[in-house]
Image (cartoon, rainbow, N blue to C red):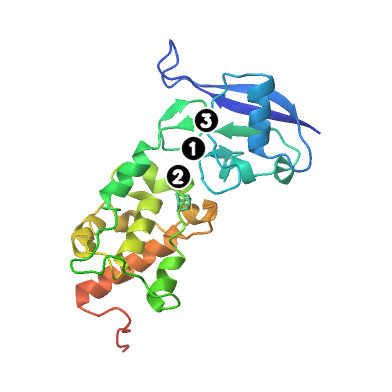
Amino acid sequence: MRLALRVFRCTPGTAGGDGAHRWQAYEVEAGADTTVLDALVAIQREQDPTLAFRWACRVGMCGSCAMVVNGRERWACRMRVHDLGRVTLRVRPLYHFPVLRDLVVDMAPFNARLRAVDGAFRPRAGADSYALVPGGGAERRAIDVAIECIGCGMCLSACTMVAHDPRFPGPAALNRAFTLQRDSREGGAEERWPLLLDEDALTRCHGQGTCTDVCPMGLSPTDSILKLRRAAVRRAVGIPRGRRPREG
Ligand code: SF4
């Protein structure tokens, strides 16, 4: 079939380029298994070598081809155009990131948000140099469901609070914080709580779940945020993890 695309074009730093963008129309031939990334590569190779976009693994592992297709965050390498129906594809860069060129965004804000919650693992004092979280245990199960973030940025793009509050760490960073707070080997948990309890952090999430809807790894940052909130309440009233508050 003949596939029509309208692709966001923008070259910041050129005359008239700052913030200005246009939508450029293309057509490519598409088969049953053609992905959005295949279509973009065909455009770049056969029609327009100036079109800029990012990709690496092409098999849904690296997350670098994250973009917004027909109004929704998707990884271009796993999105078959056939599954989008017979429509003109509108392809634009992720929201809430500075555009470097066309579909390529600057991921620096993503990393800055991770830093804002102190997102690096710091071994607890006195921990074994090769400490393990035992497989099958409650701690392992709690962390496992949140650990496979590939840093694609789709959740940040989909999050409405990120647009309103630049100090809000956003879903990926809070999801990361959850995995660290839940990890018994982590030495920075107490220092991290003030960052999480800042008025622009945990409480800013409105639980709309748009991050969870788009996460290509099936993670639920929404759930991680709720669990962090519950842990914060338990910590505030002195209930140890694992013990339920008394009812009545
Ligand atoms: S939590 Fe999901 S959507 Fe967000 S950066 Fe990680 S993999 Fe991407």
Q: As displayed, is residue 42 above or below residue 140?
A: above
Q: Residue at x 26, y 71 (%)?
A: 233
Residue corresponding to mark 1: 94
Residue corresponding to mark 3: 103
- Per the model, the C-alpha gap separating discs 3 and 2 is 13 Å
Q: Quadrant of residue 134?
A: bottom left
- Per the model, the C-alpha gap separating discs 1 and 2 is 8 Å
Residue corresponding to mark 2: 153
Badge 2 amino acid: Gly
Element marked by disc 3: loop
Residue in the foreground of this view, choosing between 189 and 202: 189
Where is residue 36? Give x, y as percent.
Answer: 65, 37
Element marked by disc 2: loop
Quadrant containing the N terminus in the rendered view: top right
**CB-based contact (under 8 Å), mark 1 and mark 2:** yes
Q: Residue furthest right?
A: 1
Badge 3 amino acid: Leu
Residue in the foreground of this view, choosing between 233 and 153: 153
